[in-house]
Amino acid sequence: MEHGFYTLQDFLLYTKGWAYILMGASLVVFLAYWKFLFSRDKD
Amino acid sequence: MKRRNFLGLMGAAGVSAAFATKAQAAGNVHFEGYPGSKGVLFDAVRCIGCRKCEEGCNTVNNLPAPEKPFDDLTVLDTRRRTQNEAFTVVNKYQPDGGPSVFSKIQCMHCLEPSCASACFVAAFKKQPSGAVTYDESVCVGCRYCMVACPFEIPTFTYDDPITPKVVKCDLCEANIQAGRITIPGCVAKCPKEALVYGERKELIKIARNRIAAAPDKYMDHIYGEHEMGGTSWLNLAGVSFSQIGMREDLGVKSGPELTSGALSVVAMVPALWPLLLAGLYGVTKRSEKINKKEKAEAVAEAISATQEKAQADLKAAMERAQADKEATVKREVAKALEEAAKAAEQGEKEEEGA
Amino acid sequence: MTTEAVSKKTLFTPFNVITGMILIMGAFLTVWRFGWGLGPVTNLDHNNPWGIWIGFDLLCGVALAAGGYVTSSAVYLFGMKKHHAAVRPAILTAFLGYLFVVIALQYDLGRPWRLAYPFVVQSGTTSMLFEVGLCVALYLTVLFLEYSPAALEWLGYKRLRNMIHRCTIALTIFGVILSTLHQSSLGALYLIAPSKLHPLWYSTYLPTFFFVSSAAAGMSMVLFEGWVSHKAFHNKMSKDYLSQHDDLYYSFAKGASWVLLGYVFIKVIGVAVDDNWHLLATGWGQWFLFELLGFALLPSLLYAIGVREKNLKLIRWTALLTVLGIILNRLNVSLIAYNYHLPSEMRYFPSWQEFGVTLFVCTMLVVTFKFIVTRMPIFHEHPEYKDEH
């Protein structure tokens, strides 16, 4: 591991930072993907 | 459609139930803390309640002079807690009405601090030295750290309208880093060696040796070795810690561990809710569409059925009319023939009669 | 036009006089709080860092504003389309609820001008409060967007209004995600303090308890608010709204009854998994049972009876009972059962100034609500946008 973490607290601070970024990304991707998935549907 | 919605709701309930299960903090990762980090061992058996540590702390940290001087030991008669102007205080206890036992309180410098876990601007940090420090420059003043601290140590400058801040012992981190002192102010002032500053691992050894050397004088318990996941500050005493104002029911789980389960669920919600809810929306919409289509078809069918019936009726009517017509013609023809026959008969008769 | 004429004629109504007095007191307390700090106006201390501004204004405020996500998801996602007329009042209530929660929070924070620090200066991502803050900030934005068509219709910005209207489903789903997160995280705030919160209220299920009860709170609040609004703004309500009203009442009463029953069970499971049965026999246990049986199980049954007997009056009073129950639960967790281990002289009781600020904020909410519903198309549809749902 290139990130040397000595405490669980520091580890969580780092990983949860990424988790929040991915949460935001997932919402954007979901929205775009939903449009892609249904764009050929004509009704 | 009702059934589909019901299934959707059941699915939603299922997912929220799954969220409630406690997720692992960080897989199988394990943390040992900073190597060589320091702490303090306080020995209540050695403490004589002279309040010199309080004085040392006050001097080193440039705190305002207290109302009553430090050599006034009558203040020990009332139970005190840490204050904005006192990062550490000594309290006097008389367990079971016996001789006085003194206990010093200050920040315990948790290995995994609850305050750090709770702070939403990460103002608290466990330093490699062992100290838990606080950074005023980012503090919003929400006081969640005070809610979180199991030892009830941090205080808040409530009377400051512009720059209120949290106050607590920093194990003299700022002073030591600046090179002004080498050991914490309270430890330096202790006349009885009731306080020892050193590597936490060494302190635990010292504490064990003291217990082993005088098992009748010490409780077999190093307070802070495991409490709240372990603290850099350690305590020894000759009576049970709950008798000298230290809670023994805190458990061994650290602050970060206590919240990590809920925290790990947080990331699942934005990932799974859209799948479920958008899916549910899709199902609702689709069933609406199907309903609409079915309705339209039913209407069309009804119309065509009506039309067919109308046509059939018309045809029948036409046929009937035709039949009627034919019947009438036949009848008329028959009638005419009959009449002709009658006339002919009469003519013959008349001829006969003449 | 007519409303203006009416308000001119009756400027000194009892409502206006009392409101005016509360607002003046609030302004006075605001100056006191920000000029002299938290110390002189609150009973907060080092042992009790959070008072009613968190326990009531934040925790209860957010729980009772859950009607927004409950109604919009019921109508747009769960296929209860016929109740669409109920969405706007619910969204407006939620929006104002959250707005005033954030305003009330300014009084409690030591340095409110740093409110954005967690997101722009340094993020404490391990904090449940970070999660709450982020979600409340985002959800307030979502609610503003969900509410804005009403304001834009009133103002006549047709294109912008239609643009936002197209995002309804996406906003609704986003709103449910954010609500799930911060409603549960408000409970999760207390996970870090197992030694301070009484074991009957402390549970690793706290986030689930808060989330599930927020759904019941949301539905009951829609019912309760519908009742009050009905009395105050009957003339503003469209035929559409009124004709659906009873039907909506029964739907939401059924929903709330069902959710409350589930809530009772998960609370009991919470007692079971921590093996806290023996605590039920103590004084705290009786208080716990009083809350659980009197303010969760009882309303669940009363709702069910109300629905079966088609008794609107019973449903309304049950809604009030449920709302009070949610308030009691949040106060128990944040204030009453919190610090239960401290001797009584070290416990917290709010100062009159704390009550005053809370009253002030609630009054501002009511005044703003009144201002909006008497002007904007909330309880009725704007004539230009009919039949668009």
Image (spheres, rainbow, N blue to C red):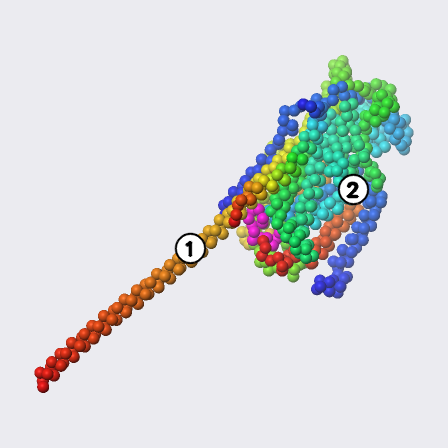
Residue at (37% x, 59% y) in the render: B308
Q: Residues within 10 Å of mark 2 (few under 14, many from 20)?
A: some
Which residue is disc 2 drawn over? C112
Does any portion of residue B307 appear in the rendered image?
yes
CA gap, disc 2 to disc 1? 67 Å
Identify the residue at horizontal 85%, vertical 43% (top origin).
C36
Q: Residue furthest front?
A: A40
The image position of residue B83, as x and y in percent, is: 83, 33
Chain identifier of the residue bearing label 1 in the image: B
**Quadrant location, the N terminus of chain C:** bottom right
Tell me which corner region of the image, top left, top right, bottom left or bottom right, holds residue B93. Answer: top right
Which chain does the residue under circle 2 lie in?
C
- Left or right of B147: which side holds C224? left
Residue B301 shows which numbered tag? Answer: 1
Q: Amino acid at mark 2?
A: Pro
Do marks 2 and 1 share a subunit? no
Looking at the image, which residue is at 85% across and 21% down? B182
In terms of image quadrants, where is residue B276?
top right
Residues shaded magenta: C75-90
Q: Is residue B242 above or below residue C338?
A: above
Q: Amino acid at mark 1?
A: Glu
The front one of C106 and C334 is: C106
Whole-percent x and y of residue B279? 55, 42
